[in-house]
Structures are given as C-alpha cells and as structure tokens.
Image (cartoon, helix red, strand yellow):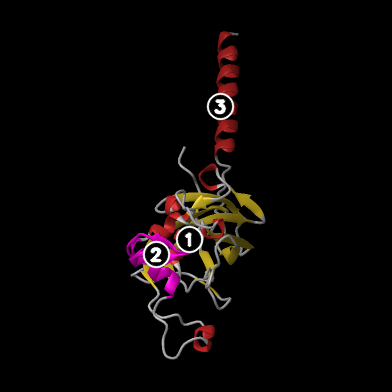
C-alpha cells in the first residue's frame, strides 16, 4: 500500500512538472519602429516698413526697417505708428517689447517741401529755435540762452508714449502714458502671441509735450515758448521685440 501511494505522488509531480514546462514555452515580441522625441520651436517675425514679414538673422543684429516713423510732429498732437508680429513656430509665447539705442540730433536742414516756398536755399534752423538756444527776444521779453538742445536727448523727456497690443492698452510701468526716456532699457510684457503664424498688431502712440515757462511775464499766448528749442530736432530709437515660451518662476 505504501509503494502504491508513493507511485501516485511521483506520477502527480511529473504531471505538474510537465504542465509547467509547456506554459514556459509560450512567448512573443513586438517592436515599434522609428520612435523619436523632437522639440518644438518658435520664430518671431516682425513686419517692416514695406509690409513684409522678416526676422533678424544677421550677426550684427541690425534689424528690420521700422514702420514706426513719425515726421513733422506738432506739440500736443497724438501720432500713431503700427507694426505686426507673427510667431511662426509651434509653441505659444509671451511677447515683450524693449525701447533702446536712443540717438538725438539737430536737423541741420529742414527738408520739408514747404521750406522752399519761404526762403531761397536751405533753411538751417528756424528763428524761434535760435532765440531759445542762443538767447533773444520774444514779445519784447528777453529770452536767456538755453543752449543747443537737440543733441542732448532731453527730447526723450518730452516725447510721451503709450502702447496697444491686440487692441488693448498695455500700461507700461503702470501708466497709460510714459516718457520715452523712462522706457529705455527695460523689457515690457505685451501679452500672448500664439503659434502657427497668427498675426497680431502692436500700436505705438506718441506725443510731443509742451514746455511751460513758469516765470513768463509776457503775453500768456507765449507761455510755452521753451518748446521752441526742440523745433526741427529728432530722436531715433530701436524697438526690440522678444518672444519667450516659458517664464522663470
């Protein structure tokens, strides 16, 4: 009886071992070909003064010809320049704006065609500017010489700027209007610029402010005479745009 029992145990063990060996022989493999990981990209394009989109890929960073170019501005009037931007990449970005590279100058020749109707030859400076810069009389009141103003870039304190992006006012430095000189050398956030070539408009309003003489004793019509010192003067600047996909925390 004992030997029969041991025989049954041995047979059962062999049966279990046989089943286990059969299951271990089943196997299979599959493969995904050409798996890859590629990065997104962004490419900021800016419209130039001819209406063509382009980017600055030059080593010297000389940029696009500007579409923000205001000439013969009168004090107290608002003038507008616009440009369009595109993100031709595959990821949204936040658009930033930067005013820099200020250069100021006296315009040595009044190139406006109306000057030809008044004098022969070239009109170097208008007489009111000469009075302010070198001294003279206005309304029979002596005007002390203020010195030549055009090249000192004090004009940056007189030109006011406000910016709109996507039709909405962007309060740079928390203000609607800012002196151009106060905006120099800082980056300012404008807002979202979407992927895949969506066009957005950046509008820049500019205004040349009046300067009041607090000690003026003549007729009140001429109380803003210090403004004359900046006649036919010019300030140039670069507008740098930046696009950032991820902001640092």
The residue lying at 53 percent from left, 48 percent from top is 172
Look at the numbered discs 1 and 2 and tell me whether their residues touch, using CB distance below 8 Å: yes
- Counting residues from the N terminus, which is met first, the one under dot 1 or under dot 3? 3
Report if the CB atoms under discs 3 and 2 are less than 8 Å apart. no
Whether residue 200 can be seen here: yes
The residue that disc 1 covers is 225
Where residue 120 sits in the image (x, y, percent)? Answer: 44, 91
Label 1 to label 3: alpha-carbon separation: 115 Å
- Name the foreground residue: 199 vs 175: 175
- Magenta stretch: give its range: 126-152
Quick one: which residue is furthest to the bottom in this view? Answer: 120
- The residue sitting at the right extreme is 167
Callout 2: SS: helix
Q: Name the residue under label 3.
A: 14
Q: How far apart are marks 3 and 2 (CA)?
A: 117 Å
Which one is in front, 127 or 71? 127
Question: In which quarter of the view is residue 127 placed?
Answer: bottom left
Rendering coords of residue 158 (x, y %): 47, 56
Dot 1 crowding, Cα within 10 Å, few <14, some 14–19, many 20+: many
Is residue 129 shown in magenta?
Answer: yes
Label 2: how many Cα within 10 Å (few below 14, some 14–19, many 20+): many
Vertical comparison of 224 with 9: above or below: below
Pointer 2 residue = 132
Residue at 60%, 14% (x, y): give it.
4
């Amino acid at each position: 009886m004992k030997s029969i029992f041991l025989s049954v145990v041995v047979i059962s063990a062999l049966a279990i071992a046989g089943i286990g060996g059969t299951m271990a022989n089943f196997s299979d493999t599959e493969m995904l070909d050409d798996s890859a990981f590629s990065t997104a990209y962004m490419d900021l394009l800016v419209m130039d003064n001819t209406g063509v989109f382009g980017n600055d890929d030059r080593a010297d960073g000389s940029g696009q010809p500007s579409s923000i170019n205001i000439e013969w501005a009168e004090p107290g009037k608002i003038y507008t320049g616009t440009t369009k931007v595109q993100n031709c990449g595959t990821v949204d970005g936040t658009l930033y704006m930067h005013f820099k590279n200020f250069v100021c100058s006296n315009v040595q020749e009044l190139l406006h065609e109306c000057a030809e109707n008044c004098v022969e030859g070239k009109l170097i400076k208008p007489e009111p500017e000469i009075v302010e810069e070198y001294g003279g009389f206005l309304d029979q009141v002596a005007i002390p010489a203020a010195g030549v103003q055009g090249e000192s870039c004090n004009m940056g304190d007189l030109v006011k700027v406000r910016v709109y992006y996507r039709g909405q006012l962007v309060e740079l430095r928390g203000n609607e209007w800012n002196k151009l000189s106060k905006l120099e050398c800082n980056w300012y956030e404008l807002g979202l610029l979407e992927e895949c070539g969506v066009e957005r408009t950046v509008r820049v309003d500019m205004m040349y402010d009046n300067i009041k003489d607090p000690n003026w004793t003549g007729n009140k019509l001429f109380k803003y005479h210090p403004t004359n010192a900046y006649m036919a003067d010019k300030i140039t600047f670069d507008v740098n745009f930046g696009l950032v996909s991820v902001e640092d925390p």
